[in-house]
Amino acid sequence: VGYQHIRRVHPDSKIPVIIVANKSDLLHARQVQTNDGIQLANELGSIFLEISTRENYDDVYDVFQHLCREVSKVHMNNNGEKRRGSIIPRPKSPNMQDLKRRFKQALSSKAKSGANL
C-alpha cells in the first residue's frame, strides 16, 4: 500500500508533500480512511486532500497550485531571497554548454530562413 511507502520515502524531509486520495467518489473502493490520511499528513507536516476528478476536475488544479506554493516557500531563505539551485540537483554534462550553443544556432538559422520567405 502507498501509505507505508510514503512513510519510508519521506522521513524528516524538507521537500513539500501533499497526500492526495484520488477517486473519492468511489466510497466502496476506499483503501485509506480519511483519519489515517490526515494522521500521516500531520506526521509529515503536510496536508491530506481527497479529490474526485469525476466530480470536480478543478480539484487536481488546486492540488498542483498548493504544491507550487509550498515549493516556492522552500525556495525562499530566511532573508526572503530566492535560493539558487533546485531541491534536486540537476546532473551536469560536460557537453551541456556546447549543446546549448548548437541549439541556439539551429533556432537562429531557422528564424532567419523563415524571415526570408
Image: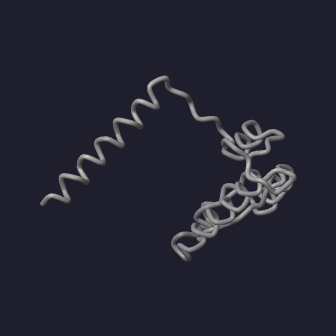
> Residue 108: x and y, percent?
30, 48
> Residue 103: x and y, percent?
35, 40
Task: Tell me the residue at 71%/65% (across/down).
Answer: 49
> Residue 22: x and y, percent?
60, 61
Left or right of 63 on screen, residue 56? left
Here the colouring is one colour
Near-viewer residue (47 or 31): 47
The reply to whether residue 94 is visible in this rendering is: yes
Task: Tell me the residue at 63%/69% (across/down).
Answer: 62
The reply to whether residue 18 is visible in this rendering is: no
Q: Quadrant of residue 6?
A: top right
Q: Residue furthest top?
A: 94
Left or right of 104 on screen, residue 26? right
Compared with residue 111, is residue 88 higher up or lower down, i.e. above or below?
A: above
> Residue 91: x and y, percent?
56, 30
Q: How many marks?
A: 0
Near-viewer residue (2 or 105): 105
Task: Tell me the residue at 64%/35% (across/down).
Answer: 89
**Quarter of the picture holding the N terminus:** top right
Q: Quadrant of residue 72?
A: bottom right
Task: Tell me the residue at 25%/54% (across/down).
Answer: 111
Near-viewer residue (112 or 70): 112
Compared with residue 58, is residue 49 higher up or lower down, i.e. above or below?
A: above
Q: Residue furthest left?
A: 117
Left or right of 85 on screen, residue 46? right
**Quarter of the picture holding the C terminus:** bottom left
Compared with residue 57, is residue 117 higher up or lower down, i.e. above or below?
A: above
